[in-house]
């Protein structure tokens, strides 16, 4: 993106801040998530090589490790050679500049105290917390406050008093449909800590793969994984890595459906006896465990007991979603079982299965978590519902006495823009729940399903949007828009965007741009791999022309990608659709430029010139990209998109010239141009142009 548009985009976000926002010091800094309280105290702390950390109380190993990571990142950002860059528990520093005090080691349990208080004065920084986990979060806030002044690095004089809004703030990564190596998991755990997330939900089994080593039933991973699975040593390593960052690891073993990979090595578990192979397609499949056979529960008792010993967290996820019941109803013996117990349908049979599994989990000291489908009148209240249907369903669960976490609206695999997730409030101000019922809403969890991601692209689908979602889970001061259920919206309707909400969203994007760059230091590849993918696509050409196009397109949203092309677990994920990013910033900034230009009366010469410059660049890009497409056949599928962008830009230039003129256009002229815009909205290569709404707005301002 050009420097000019970057500057203009920054000016827009600043201009949109309301008076209340400008008076809130939290929104003048680059903090995410927003802390509960922040007070400016004046002055600055000047950073130099003598900066060192000391402990007022006995530090834990977790805290020492966190401080060393903090100092390493500080050195990386500033280039300063610190006198004390690395500490041990025994290190004693004279006159430390940052003094940390904790009361105890934090436990990796729900409702642990994660609060902290950070005080920055010109001569000293104090960080106080009940637990070392709270202290880790204080360090994350401190490093976000790092700034520059007169050629040096400083921390502003502030006092931060902070604690999370919700105790369950999670990210789910599906490592079953496409396997995600340990390094992918670890770098995302680092990103999670940076955003004060505390639950890593590890989706480990699916129709497409069984990804965990079982020493009790080794044929599960030997035959169900294609050789891509985590050894128990690797799992322990990840759990320890997460624990060192204050993050709980909740494993998911999806049963009784989504279980084809289980049956490859153990067909005796299935409701339909036959030979099974790993499923290569995606979708809802019929193979299901047989809930009527005691041998199945004996098997699950031994397997879940093994996993309970491997995963120390109090919670274990059983999935339970999308059970079709087809193989149950086709099995005469299972139907007879249901009739004898007066079960009305397959949901009753699944409730029977879930209650049996619940008893097994309780025997092994675990609390059951499951997707919405496990909610049934026969289920006791000591389970946790993960809601993917929507807020209304979660309200119903709370009124029934069930704890729940919200995932609807946080399906980040659906490629929706950041602001759609950001306004999705698990507990909006108008919630009809009582105070006691509100306590049953534990928080939220974003879900990264992996049908269309690889280790190379997954970070770009998680970050930076996950940072904005993390703010929703941590901070009280987030906007709320009651969008339709099931996350079907891809944009927020304009009539729902009050000036206050628009201001909060603009400020979120301002801070997100900074945070997105900062979290790269954890090894996250959401920015750097963009250029990697483009270089591969152009087959030796310079990437600039392709980047100009891909900067303003996005993958199709919701569930349109599999509807437009059949995918399997072996399909390549190296095309333009995989390089294109959710919530394309260049397109978003252009839409905002046009909106402000038109709302201000279309008279700003500078804004008009910038709109023209952008449109001329996109208009001319197609002819310059054609030689690249001819040399790289993988790009042929987006040739029509490139041509449409050129035509759309030409139309925008025409509209720009006509706005404010006395050259009136008739209805037929307008109808033809509106049809051109509709044609430009049609996707190609499972991608779509994201400036069509801006061109449409320009066109609607043409005199007629």
Image: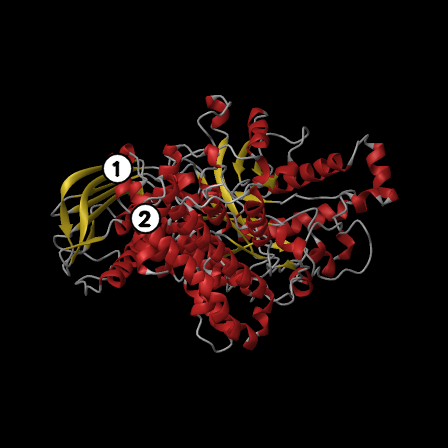
Q: Is residue 476 visible?
A: no
- Name the N-terminal-most of marks 1 and 2: 1
Left or right: 337, with 617 as reference point: right
Q: Using the image, determine if residue 176 lies above or below residue 290.
A: below
Can the viewer see residue 689?
Answer: yes
The x, y position of residue 181, in whole percent, is 52, 63
Q: Residue at x 15, y 52 (%)?
A: 96
Label for residue 445? none
Q: Quadrant of the N terminus?
A: bottom left
Q: Position of residue 353 (x, y in %)?
A: 71, 40
Q: Is residue 531 above or below residue 645?
A: below
Q: Locate residue 640 relative to residue 295 in the image: left or right.
A: left
Q: Secondary structure at mark 1?
A: helix
Question: Which callout, 1 or 2, points to the residue nearer the camera?
Answer: 1
Q: Residue at x 46, y 44 (%)?
A: 702
Q: Give how far across and how far down residue 118 sits, in percent.
A: 24, 42
Who is closer to the viewer here, 535 or 325?
535
Q: Looking at the image, which residue is at 23% across and 57% down?
A: 90
The reply to whether discs 1 and 2 touch (Cβ–Cβ < 8 Å) is no
Dot 2: element: helix
- Residue ID for mark 1: 22
- Disc 2: which residue: 136
């Amino acid at each position: 993106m050009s420097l000019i548009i970057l500057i203009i985009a920054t000016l827009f976000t600043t201009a949109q801040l309301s008076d209340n926002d400008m008076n809130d010091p939290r929104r003048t800094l680059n903090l995410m998530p927003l802390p509960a309280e922040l007070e400016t105290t004046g002055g600055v702390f000047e950073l130099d090589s003598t900066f060192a950390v000391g402990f007022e109380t006995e530090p834990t190993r977790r805290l020492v490790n966190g401080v060393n990571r903090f100092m390493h990142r500080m050195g990386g950002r500033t280039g300063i050679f610190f006198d004390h860059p690395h500490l041990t528990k025994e290190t004693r520093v004279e006159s430390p500049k940052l003094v940390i005090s904790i009361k105890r080691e934090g436990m990796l349990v729900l409702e642990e105290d994660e609060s902290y208080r950070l005080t920055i004065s010109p001569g000293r920084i104090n960080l106080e917390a009940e637990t070392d986990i709270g202290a880790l979060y204080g360090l994350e806030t401190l490093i976000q406050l790092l700034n520059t002044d007169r050629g040096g690095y400083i921390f502003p004089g502030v006092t931060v008093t902070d604690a999370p809004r919700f105790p369950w703030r999670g990210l789910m990564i599906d490592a079953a449909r496409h396997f995600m190596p340990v390094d992918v998991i670890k770098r995302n755990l680092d990103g999670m800590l940076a955003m004060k997330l505390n639950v890593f939900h590890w989706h480990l089994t699916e129709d497409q793969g069984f990804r965990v080593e079982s020493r009790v039933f080794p044929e599960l991973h030997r035959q169900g994984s294609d050789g891509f699975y985590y050894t128990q040593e690797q799992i322990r390593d990840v759990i320890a890595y997460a624990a060192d960052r204050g993050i709980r690891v909740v494993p998911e073993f999806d049963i009784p459906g989504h279980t084809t990979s289980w049956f490859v090595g153990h067909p005796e578990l299935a409701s339909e006896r036959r030979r099974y192979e790993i499923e290569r397609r995606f979708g809802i499949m019929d193979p299901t465990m047989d809930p009527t056979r005691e041998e199945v529960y004996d098997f699950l008792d031994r397997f879940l007991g093994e996993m309970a010993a491997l995963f120390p967290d109090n919670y274990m996820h059983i999935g339970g979603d999308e059970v079709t019941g087809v193989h149950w109803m086709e099995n005469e013996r299972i139907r007879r079982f249901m009739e004898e117990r007066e079960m009305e349908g397959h949901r009753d049979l699944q409730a029977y299965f879930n209650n049996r599994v619940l008893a097994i989990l309780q025997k092994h000291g675990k609390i059951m978590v499951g997707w919405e489908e496990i909610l049934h009148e026969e289920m006791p209240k000591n389970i946790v519902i993960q809601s993917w249907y929507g807020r209304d369903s979660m309200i119903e669960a709370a009124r029934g006495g069930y704890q729940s976490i919200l995932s609807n609206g946080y399906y980040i695999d659906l490629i929706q823009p950041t602001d759609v997730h950001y306004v999705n409030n698990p507990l909006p101000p108008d919630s009809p729940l009582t105070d006691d019922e509100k306590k049953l809403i534990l928080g939220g969890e974003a879900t990264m399903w992996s049908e269309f991601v690889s280790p190379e692209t997954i970070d770009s689908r998680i970050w930076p949007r996950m940072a904005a979602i993390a703010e929703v889970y941590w901070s009280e001061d987030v906007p709320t828009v009651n969008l339709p259920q099931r996350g079907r919206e891809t944009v927020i309707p304009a009539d729902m965007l009050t000036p206050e909400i628009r201001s909060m969203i603009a400020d979120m994007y301002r801070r997100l741009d900074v945070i997105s760059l900062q979290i790269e230091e954890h090894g996250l590849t959401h920015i750097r791999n963009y250029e990697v993918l483009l270089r591969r696509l152009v087959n030796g050409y310079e990437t600039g022309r392709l980047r100009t196009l891909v900067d303003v397109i996005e993958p199709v949203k919701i569930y349109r990608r599999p509807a437009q092309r059949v995918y399997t677990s072996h399909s390549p994920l190296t095309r333009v659709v995989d390089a294109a990013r959710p919530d394309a910033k260049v397109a978003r900034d252009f839409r905002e430029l046009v909106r402000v230009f038109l709302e201000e009366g279309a008279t700003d010469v500078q804004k008009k010139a910038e709109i023209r410059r952008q449109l001329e660049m996109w208009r001319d890009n197609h002819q310059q990209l054609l030689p690249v497409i001819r040399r790289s056949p993988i790009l042929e599928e987006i040739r029509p998109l490139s041509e449409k962008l050129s035509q759309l830009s030409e139309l925008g230039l025409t509209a720009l010239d006509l706005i404010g003129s006395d050259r009136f256009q008739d209805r037929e002229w307008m109808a033809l141009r509106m049809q051109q815009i509709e044609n430009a909205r049609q996707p190609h290569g499972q991608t779509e142009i994201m400036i069509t709404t801006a061109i449409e707005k320009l066109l609607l301002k043409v005199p007629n």
